[in-house]
Image: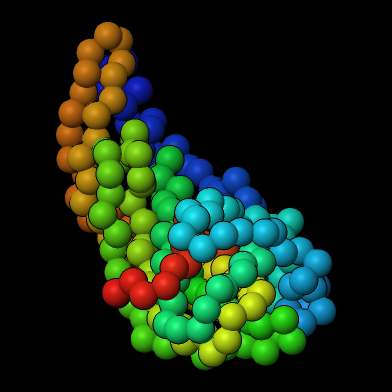
Amino acid sequence: MKKVALICVLFVMGCSSGGGGIQEYREAASKGRSQSLSNSVVQGASSAALTQDLKGEITIADPMFLNLGYASNYDVYRIKIPASGTYHVNVKALCDCLGFNKTLIFPSIKLLDVNMKELKIGEGKIQEGKQSGNLLKANLPAHLDADWKIDVGAPGEYYLVVAPYNKNLEKLALAINSNFTTSTGGYNVYGTVTNIPLVAHPYGKYIVRIEKNSLL
């Protein structure tokens, strides 16, 4: 019985994202922390390169803006685009899969030029990403895989903003089936968990990448 109890704790014990909780987010949003991207985006930008996998995490400490009418914390990257053309942006919103409450951000992006003019986001899709590994020890955990196309009219410096779209917080964003492997008391334990709910959260980890001429 003790061995079974140890296994159950991994799945039942509550857990929230390390970046903050829903209540902290709502308090920050109600205090009017949101500001326009034009006033803050340049100061907080991190330099990045094309075709680079940028690993980040949205937290309560990040700046906040109104994203399609909803307060959202965000990260921003300064990227030099060498030529005009169609570019592809991919965001993998990673699951915080420990404990009972499994969460991830519902991703969105913006691309701005040096004059803070927002470029039009073109064709895109958001779908379940392919998990690498098992639920408890995943090389690439369960995630939402989001892709967009953006037409860039001229070479130069641009600002890529990654932010959650917080309209449907605490609602189902994705349901997955996953195998798991763990060990306790010297025994390996295998199993399958079905219809695991992943809910939208204002904070979470992601991987973003921008490159030219990739197909959705």
Residue 8 versus residue 21: which sits nearer the camera? Answer: 21
Q: Where does residue 78 sit, x and y in percent of width and height?
A: 66, 66
Q: Quadrant of the N terminus?
A: top left
The mark total stands at 0
Left/right of residue 197 with respect to residue 21 in the rendered view: left
Q: Where does residue 180 sit, x and y in percent of width and height?
A: 24, 35
Q: Quadrant of the C terminus?
A: bottom left
Residue 156, picture quadrant:
bottom right
In the picture as drawn, the residue positioned furthest to the top comes out as: 186
Residue 44 versus residue 86: which sits nearer the camera? Answer: 86
Residue 172 versus residue 50: which sits nearer the camera? Answer: 50
What's the residue at 26%, 54% (across, down)?
Answer: 130
Residue 13 versus residue 148: which sits nearer the camera? Answer: 148
Scheme by which the image is coloured: rainbow
- Vertical comparison of 153 with 205: above or below: below
Q: Is residue 106 visible?
A: no
What's the residue at 72%, 81% (across, down)?
Answer: 114
What's the residue at 33%, 51% (across, down)?
Answer: 142
Residue 211, picture quadrant:
bottom left
